[in-house]
Image: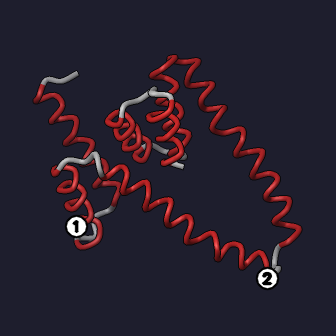
Amino acid sequence: MLPLIQHEVVDKKGWLSEDEFLNCTALSQSSPGPIAVNIAVLTGYRTHKFWGSVCTTLGAVLPAIFIMTGVAALFSHFYGQKALDHIFAGIRPVVTALIASAVIKMGKNFRFRGYFVGAIALLLVVVLKVSPIYVILGSISIGVIIHFIKGKK
């Protein structure tokens, strides 16, 4: 979803800059709920305040509800058939490629400190077994402190 959202919101419509989109993505990942809905809320609020958030949220949620209802009906009908297993096996590499594409595209805009912070977060979670929640909360706290030290709004 991220590459599609980024293409539409940043490249095509120009509602957000690359940096704003990266900030929205980071905030959306650290907030509860689906990332696409969180980005929709932030983008809608930035462009048209409250009603923009309402409209973008509905635009992000309603198609998924209709599609998933149809897929669930079809899935329950075809459950257990070999063809369905083959379809899912074919989808896995595509999903992996889409995620890799989003990471590579977003990684182009990172500065060295972004890679450094990411490496430290990876080290804390994987090697030192620190809970990701503490890493996220710590990163937010450090970001807020740096924000106020630099005096930015």
Residue under the image location 39 percent in, 37 percent down: 21
The amino acid on which the numbered mark 1 sits, given as a three-letter code, is Leu
Disc 2 or 1, which lies upstream in sequence?
2
In this picture, is 139 found above or below 23? Answer: below
How many numbered badges does the structure rendering display? 2
Picture quadrant of residue 36: top right
Q: Badge 1 is on which residue?
A: 123
Residue under the image location 64 percent in, 74 percent down: 90
- Closer to the camera: disc 2 or disc 1? 2
Residue under the image location 17 percent in, 56 percent down: 116
In this picture, is 106 found above or below 59? Answer: below
Q: Position of residue 69 (x, y in %)?
A: 80, 51
Q: Quadrant of the C terminus?
A: top left
* Left or right of residue 76: residue 129: left
Q: Badge 2 is on which residue?
A: 82
Q: Position of residue 35 (x, y in %)?
A: 50, 45
Residue reaching furthest bottom? 82
SS at mark 1 in the image: helix
Picture quadrant of residue 76: bottom right
In this picture, is 78 found above or below 111? Answer: below
Q: CA distance from mark 2 to mark 1?
A: 41 Å
Q: Position of residue 108 (x, y in %)?
A: 29, 50
Residue under the image location 31 percent in, 52 percent down: 107
SS at mark 2 in the image: helix
In this picture, is 58 found above or below 151? Answer: below
The amino acid on which the numbered mark 2 sits, given as a three-letter code, is Lys
Residues under numbered marks 2 and 1 in contact, where contact means CB atoms less than 8 Å apart: no
* Left or right of residue 140: residue 46: right
